Image (cartoon, helix red, strand yellow):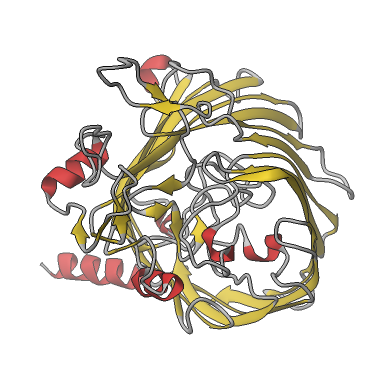
Amino acid sequence: MMLSALTAMAQVDSIFNGLTYNVEASGNLSDGKFAPLWFSSGRFGLSSVEPNSGYVRAGIRRSADCDSLHTWRFGYGLDVAVPVNFTSDFVLQQLYGTVQYKFAQLTLGTKEIDQEMLNRELSSGAMSLSNNARPIPQVRLEIPEFLPLHFTDDWVGIKGHIAYGWYTDNRWQRNFTNKQSLFSQDSHFHSKAAFIRIGRDDLCPFSATFGLQMSCQFGGTGYNIADRSDDCNMLTDVELGDGLKSYWYALIPGGHDVNDGNYGNVQGNQNGNWYFDMKFQGRGWSVRTYAEHFFEDHSQLFVQYAWKDMLWGVELKLPKNKYVSRFVAEYLNTRDQTGGLYHDRSDVVPLQISGRDDYYNHHTFGAWQHWGQAQGNPLLLSPIYNVANRQLYFYFNRVSAVHIGLNGEPTDELHYRLLFSNLRTWGTYDQPTLSPIDQNYLLAELTYNPNKYKGWSATLGYGLNNGDLIGNSNGVSFTIRKTGILR
């Protein structure tokens, strides 16, 4: 009995080992109507589109990897920020607990979860779920790393997840729309993914990965929801479904929305993407080509229609040198959206054409966003920029864009990052632009990690917007942070 008590005390004590802390202060100044886009995007929503903003931030974290020698592993984190000129005056960025048993991991709470498969620092962003918006509190069960299947002699590995969560931007939606246009309250979140990797790095330089990720916003209450007949009737205070059946329809798409009428689709704001990549790995270097195909509902889920809208990319890891460590180039096209024609089957014309997908927009929930920022790729301009009409809507979702990112370590104390995006947009099918609109975005960052002062770092950034979409802007940012081990 005494031995059991001592073992329990040791286990409780060990969950504080490996506890780390971070504190940081950040600010940016710019001269345009909006801050440079890459100051505001790809930062898990801890940012602002205001030309001048900043925050102070503090957190503690314990990784489950601290228990790598144990079957059961535990982790947790707390991360808060007090900002200036943000969408809120206090940000609970992360608060979570993690339990891992062998290869399976359960996370409860709000945690920054990296986009699947794409480079966190250099990519423009995944199509369905990226690093762009604030994290959503959720219950997430997953295999976080590829699990080799021994019956294939470890040539095949699998990973995936399933999660349910809750949106936290009720007050922001009410304030942003002034309750005069489409918005939702208390809606829920669901995502799931499965990936398969074929290859063994120790035996073969080639490997390939493919998979499917799906996401959904569902439930809660909708306000100012228009009838699909476009007869100007407005439905208000409409329950969008919160029972077990709605959770099932989020998992296995089915049912219909409240204003679908005779042309029911599926319940909730459903979307997702297919993912494919091929990788060749050499001694100290590798090259990977990848593609993401985005879809909404069913129209582009399979190959009934041509897959013209894709995010194509190549990532090159170079041998150790002073100039470039990694290079990413991406091409994004969302112009097709299954074509510009939509037609429901009728007695007169018994043919259904499921076009005009209207990416990231939804007739019940408004937009695929959280706290104003796109949950997917930020090059489809987020609703938070709609300060003129206060609409939860993506007005520029038909785009063609080229994106380049690179980083490197000139010395063991310096790290840099460069991002450049060239964008052309045609608006949406419902609200097209009179002519294409061009916009350029640039980010240059340099981080100094002094060897003499362990745990300290300082980052200086320059950002630029140039074009007619959100105007011109030049800005500088500065961040200073301190990290260390508490125990």
Q: Position of residue 306 (x, y in %)?
A: 53, 18
Work out whether residue 21 can be spotted: yes
Work out whether residue 299 can be spotted: no
Identified at 35% across, 53% down, the residue is 365
State the residue in front, 350 or 96: 350
Is 149 located above or below residue 365 in the figure? Answer: above
Q: 177 left or right of 447?
A: left
Q: Position of residue 261 (x, y in %)?
A: 21, 38
Could you tell me how many numbered marks the image carries?
A: 0
Asked where in the image residue 397 lies, by quadrant, the reply is top right
Is 120 located above or below residue 340 in the figure? Answer: below
Q: 44 left or right of 345?
A: right
Is 461 located above or below residue 419 in the figure? Answer: below
Identified at 48% across, 40% down, the residue is 358
Q: Position of residue 38 (x, y in %)?
A: 69, 60
Q: 106 left or right of 284?
A: left
Asked where in the image residue 236 lies, by quadrant, the reply is bottom left
Is 382 located above or below residue 484 in the figure? Answer: above
Q: 234 left or right of 448?
A: left
Asked where in the image residue 474 lies, by quadrant, the reply is bottom right
State the residue in front, 249 or 95: 249
Question: Which quadrant: the N terminus?
Answer: bottom left
Identified at 46% across, 66% down, the residue is 371
Q: Position of residue 82 (x, y in %)?
A: 52, 84
